[in-house]
Amino acid sequence: MTTLHLSRPPRTRTARGWPGTTLLVVLVLVALNAVYGGVGLMVNGMGMPREWLEHLPVDSWVLPGVALFLTVAVPQALAAVEVWRAGERAPLVGLAAGAALVLWIVVQLLLLRRYFFLQPVIAGLGLVEMGLAAAWWRTRRGART
């Protein structure tokens, strides 16, 4: 006798297609980079000058490191999990993660009032995430019609 399983089959790379798979890779890389940066800031400031903190209500890089971890690494990792699962809302979550990453850089520029060469790179990755999420959403929508 066979057992009938009504659960959905697991989603695969095929369910994500190239936009979703590429989005997953970018999300994971950004999350890992943010973990590295956040921990580095908390431990030793990663060589960042204390003068850059003059516009903030802190005198060390510990809280900015915690902020980087909580507002970039965690959301990027959670978005990567959702994209990995390839659920219905995964493209929207990827789009939101990319927008949040761009917002992080805008807020960073406004608060620190300093330019760092990685800022446009990270903002660019946020835009890439948004573009990949939009492409994935369009691909999925087109497959349904």
Image (cartoon, rainbow, N blue to C red):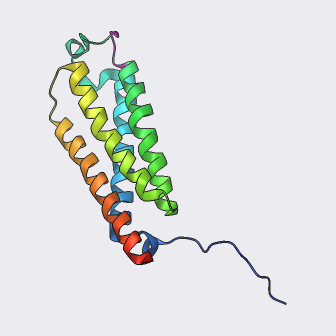
Nearer-the-camera pick, 125 or 8: 8
- Is 74 left, or right, of 95 in this rendering? right
- Is 73 left, or right, of 82 in this rendering? left
For image coordinates 37% across by 26% down, the residue present is 65
Nearer-the-camera pick, 107 or 24: 107
- The answer to whether residue 48 shows anywhere in this view is no
For image coordinates 34% across by 9% down, the residue present is 57
For image coordinates 19% across by 43% down, the residue present is 121
In x, y percent, where is residue 101?
32, 40
Q: Is the N terminus in the top left, top right, bottom left or bottom right quadrant?
A: bottom right
| Extreme-right residue of the structure | 1
For image coordinates 49% across by 72% down, the residue present is 12
Q: Is residue 135 above or below residue 4?
A: above
Task: Give yes or no for residue 25 being in the magenta stretch.
Answer: no
In x, y percent, where is residue 31?
39, 44
| Extreme-front residue of the structure | 145
- The answer to whether residue 33 shows anywhere in this view is yes
In x, y percent, where is residue 84?
48, 60
Q: Is residue 133 above or below residue 119?
A: below
State the extent of the magenta-drawn residues as a range: 57-61
In x, y percent, where is residue 16?
42, 69
Q: Is the C terminus in the top left, top right, bottom left or bottom right quadrant?
A: bottom left
